[in-house]
Image: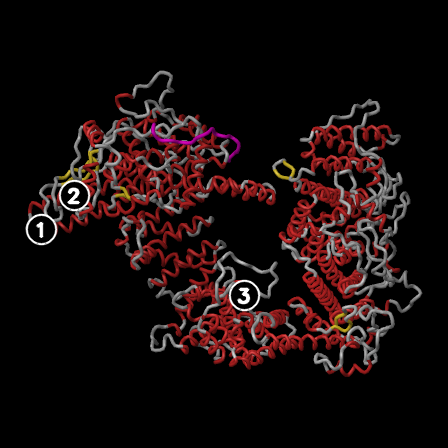
Amino acid sequence: KPVESVYSDAKKAVIAAASGQKKKRKVAVSPRGGGRKRNRADDESDTSENEELEDDQEEEASDDDDDEESESEEESSSDDDDDDDDDFQAAKSSKKSKRASPSGNGTRATKKSSSAVTKKTKIQIGGKSKSKKKTTKPTQQSSTSTTSKQIKTALSTLAKHVLPPTEEPGLKSLIAGLLSSYRPPKPIQLANFDSNVALVVTSPYTVNLHSLAEKVIELHNENPNRAQLALLNLLFRSVGGGVDTCFPIGGGATATAAAEDDGEGEEEETDLEQMETEDWATVVTDLVDDMRHAPANQILLCADPLGAVHQQNTLNRHDGGGNEKDTNEEEEEKKKGSKQYALGAAEFRKIYQEFWYILGYVALTEGGMATNTQQEGEEEEEEVSGSSVVRLDAELVKELIERVVELAPVGQPDVRAGAILAAISMSHAVLDQSAQLVKKMDVASRQYQAAKKGKNTSKAEALKVRIDSLKRSAEDLQQVVMVNFVQGLFVHRYRDSNEHIRAMCMESLSRMTLQRPDMFLTDKYLKYFGWMMHDKDHHVRIAALNGLLQPFKAVQDAQEGKEVAPADEFLMIDKIDLSLLENVVGKFLSRITFAIKDPKPEVQEVAMKVLLMLLKNGFLDDCDDDEIWDTINQRALSERASPSVRRDALYFVLDQLEAFDDDNEESESSERKRAQQLDAIASYAAHAMTNGPVPIDKIKIEVADFIVQSLRGMPEHRALVTDWSAMLRAIKDDKSATTAHNVKAGDRADVAKQRILVRMLACAAQEEVGAVADESFLNSDVDPDMANFSEKAKKASMGREHETLSIALLKALPNLLLKFKGDTDVISELACLPRFLVPTVFSLPQRKQDFMSLIKNLGEIYLSSSNDDTLDKTARSLSSLCKGNHARVTESKAQLRKVVVELRDRIVELMSSDDATVATSAMSVVNSESEFASKSARRRSGRKRSPAAGASPATEKTSLTDDDTRGSADADTEYSIFLNVKRLRILAKKCNLSEFFDHVDDTNNVNQLELLCNFVCDGLNSRLRACKPVDLRVNEDEETAADKLIEDADVLAAIGKSVYEGLQLILSVTGWFFFSYQEEEGLVKNKKDLVDDMDDVDDDDSSIDDHVILRLRNRLLSLLEMCFSQYILSSDEHGDDDTTVAKHSDEQIEFADYVQLAAGKITADLRVLFPKELSDAENPLLRAVALQDDGRLVGAFVRFISAKEHLFRENENEAKENKILPQSLLLPMGRAIANNWARGNRREAGVFLRHIASSGSTATSIVTSTVDQMKKEDPVRMLESQMASLRQSYENWVDEEPDMDNEFPSDEEMKEFEEAEELHKEQFEHLEQRGTQFSKKLGVFGKLSDDRLRPALNGFIREGVRFSFSNLDGNGEDTLVLGSRLSFLAILSKYASWIKKDKQAKKEIQSFMDEKEFELRAHEEFEDVHVDDLAALAAFRKDLGLKNLPKASANVSVTSELDDEEMDDEASDGVNELQSPVASVSSRTSKASRASSVQSRASSRVSSLPALPEGDKESPQDSESDDEDSHFSAGSSSKNSSKRKSQTQNTYDENSEEEESDSDDESSLGLGYSQKSKKARRSK
């Protein structure tokens, strides 16, 4: 401590003379206490050389009587008032009773009715000089530099927001002092602290806070009222109060008694003793009102330890107000600020607690009544020549505690929390000081006994006096805690209405049990922990459980010799008697056990730690309650438990197993012993899993992974799951499964035990490889987009452990695969193990035979298995063995080739109708001499035929089935086809199958794999034709048409699965060909390559018409259209009586739905694989494969989704949501839309966007995520799709308006009509809700997310207005009732908030609205416009802030830019061309029948894109494509459609490519969107 470098001798002499006192050894005279002496509270036995060195330094240090207030620096700025808080009513305190105090001041007792809470204190007192010196140096280095810098920045930012610019730290602004305490203390402060203060430094703030606390106590000694006002102001400002709510404080900054006269112009100082109850109520009410207007991110202290922002968000979530998604967006916008505030608020809470703790310590040692006099002596333990008296100012700290406790009953929880936190911190300081006195008393008692034995009378008498003095001081301090804190605060506040205050009370009591276990580690106080374990809030339950845990943990840490933190240096751990907890544990054991199944994982973890401590300390030895043991044991295998809970629960299980007893120690570490232990664990798990009616195949074997993970987390048992020999031995021994009591568990348990052991082996291998190998090794066979790569550092080498594991598994796996070949679950686990073997062991000569046996067995398993999991894991293992540069790659590829060829032969043989059918698509081109040709292929080789002259062998189709295919098909054959196609599909997803097929036509680059795909495609086409729905009206000349449909449920199910697997197979093969082509042509470029190639860009205008990728793509498109042609029309869609429609069974309908669902998913994948943007590519093949003509597939899929729309509506009202429905239907469409949105179909998007609301939470999430992507890609196009969606749904809503046909309806008919009307009203409310959701997606906080949206919104609103005033139907005829669409304005008004802020747009819309309304009023039928429609018009004007049109109005001058050219653009893809079902004529003219409307709602009639043509005729794939969005057609379900032009459903508007290009280049509505030309868009 280089004090000399700071002050010169002369300066020190001046300071010493000014103080008028000379320091003596161990007699610290306070420089601020008016001659009063300071109690150092040193240990009696501390007479080391360090103490002498400290005394020398004290002699050199000077007393500085200078105030540091004016020298402190503080950053501050003005307050902002923005946020609001809950209203809380201030509780009125009862009248006080005055008492005399040493300083002439009185306190008052108040009625307490709320609870107090505290956090663990960070400051301790009475440290030894050795400890003090150790902790002083790192004062400013308490955390890492990065965190320390962030904390300082956060506190500085808080100070700028909270403090006015002119506010300086000092007694008049303690809050500024606390916020600036992070600054380094001045040298004079350090010198004074090091020489005079016996306070352990536990934070970077200790020195500054101690200096501030000394000033407060010095002021209190002279003017108690003023000091207490300063402390109350600190509390008020901390919880969000402003400068105006603070008490006025008179006097100067130094606050000396001589200069205390109130200056003129200063506000009169409040006298706390003269304040009545009404005065306090007024003060608190003003404070709470000020807090309500304080922004949450400017409140320093609140009840919630995580800060006011977190508290406010929690309250908002509990209230259920607002939209959750919007809240997330707001939090995302404020994420940085929120993080900084949370850090600053948490740190201020620590500073606040530390300040009150230090204040309590300083009050005790430097108060007016504090003295510590004793005569000098060199060795106090050996000789005491005089008496010693210890006196602390207990009355002063008692007065301070009472003052803040008066605010405990206040209704506002943050004020309560601030007051209670202060009281608790001071109480902890008192307890710590009392603990030091008790320790000194124990030392003095031992010395006294020794002196008596030594007959040293004088020393004994002096020690007797000292003991009495220490005892009186300790009793005074205990009285303060017991009366003022425990009885006056704790017993009321531990049941506080605020959960955080209750939790603080429990944490405070827990701390006290460690500070003074002789006082608080008793049943009287431990019972509170038991009671509060039943609390409804998890914070309180955690605090209560921690209260029981801390004594055990403290004793355990002490026994293990762990280093004690500075803040815990003076805890009386040696006084803790754990046996005192037996009663409370016995009474609340069942509640502790139940807590391990708590809904909150944090509660589970603490409860399990408590139980584990009870187990280790013998508290559960006499527990015979099986329910308790079973509950604990079950957590070891629970999926809902956290890893730490499962690990601790497994300790209980191991403690009950005989194999883990310590009796047999002769072979404890041997392989045999470990195998027995593993067998015991697996037996227990098997018994637990089979103990019930669960079928053996339904047992969740995967929970065995938890056992492995838990064992790896136990240092003493980790070797169990890394001893591969022991694990393999346990599997081979195949012992019977037993219970924990050595009783046989049964045959089911034996089977389960084997599966568990194998699963443990697989999991242990994966965990070990993940620990010792590079992460990329585990994910080598996983799609990079799907792999989970963590941020941990890559490992440089595999390690010896990995090689040992690989050798052990390679030797054992072949035999294990044979042994468990019939057990699907075991095989599934074994099949995944080869992926974890290090490739270097494959090259070992002695392991060659093992490797060959392994790949052979894997191949046989793959060809015989039907389990998806087994097939997937086996395929991954086979494909991974074919990679790398090990010596066995050739053998691995040969084995995989045999598997592929065998699957090919099986598929061809099964799909061929009979022996006479020649499979020219595949088998006819197989070389009979090839080593890959199977026996069946060679048998057919003599019957092969050559392709027709001039035809490509790949494109020539083969007739696989004839008309009687259906008759010869049976379920077994079709199921076999499905299994083999699935096996080939799984392999196709893992590796490129073209490597295992020969080329049969090098000229056309035709591969056997392509021919196989053609064969599969033809076979599936023929089966789909045999299942295709029949309409008797189309086939009325064929009497047997209906009889030709396949009706067998098993056959239909097998064919449906084959179709799904076949579609995926062809798509995967196509994708592999496409990927290989891009790599071969170098089309995959990184950014550097693109920059280098920018100068070499030459457009290749050539075209490619024939390529394997094109051929496979077209085949797949044809098959997809056939799948969508399975659509079965309902009678409502026919519009005729049911008698004219072919009856289809439920199985046929399910089959049709299944294949269409499969086709929808593959269509989406195909659109993602070949996006429209590829049409601008430089490469001609990429341009050729771009899927631009997808209108037919899109229309068919939209038709299918629309037919299932009623299921979405039902899903919204279900108690348990069906997530599969939206994931199967909406997710594929959303993927396709998002990936093609630059040229996306707005009408398709309009149908998709319907489900943003009222279709279930999963559907909302999918649509919302897709909209976010659409907005990033093209926000204007997204806005147009919103209009399309709203208009489609609105016209559907109008079409479904209920009507009463009967002029004299019965009561039942009236009831049905009223229910229909109510349902119709709810539908419109859902439509309005959708409009609100759409509007919210345009931006946040009143700001549009994209600048392009602002001009587009103008056109959007005007288009909506135009539609609302229009009375033209879908055919352009004036058939609708005038004004019947004005209700659409109610939906359009949801966008009003965006238009109000744009004056120019508002002006244009005003003119446009005036023109349209003038035309409406001038119409001859204006008098017939319904009053509700006019009301909607008036409401729209009001929402947008538009002026009403005068009743008598001349021609309006229109400034709208909607010219004829723009209106012509509406015939394109734009939303205005949307052909919705023609709305029914209003109920005021002619309406559809109620029955038809209800049926229309039930079937969710298609309202947009068309389906494929019904009937047997198929459109060729390469025909001229329709405009992607011109396929929207409509049909009316209304019978009263005579006023409209009839429309034909499911037809196409055939347009030429030129028309399509012209119509799609410009969007409608004039929203400012235009696509670039192809040449300009083309890029490499």
Where is residue 702 shown, x and y percent of the image?
A: 54, 67
Q: Which residue is mark 1?
A: 452
Number of callouts: 3
Q: Which structural element holds mark 2? A: helix
| Nearer to us in this view, 1187 or 1577 | 1577
Q: Position of residue 829 (x, y in %)?
A: 56, 72
Instruction: Pick whichever of labels 1 and 3 is earlier in the sequence.
Output: 1
The type of residue carrying mark 1 is Lys
Q: Are discs 1 and 2 less than 8 Å apart at CB? A: no
Q: Residues within 10 Å of mark 3 (few under 14, many from 20)?
A: some
Residue under label 2: 468
Q: Is residue 79 within the magenta segment?
A: yes
Left or right: 1415 in relation to 883? right
Query: Residue 794, image x and y in percent?
Result: 50, 60
Whether residue 1012 is situated above or below residue 602 in the rendered picture: below
Write down the region rendered in magenta: 70-86
Direction top: furthest residue: 264
Q: Residues within 10 Å of mark 1 (few under 14, many from 20)?
A: some
Residue 1253 showing in the rendered view: no
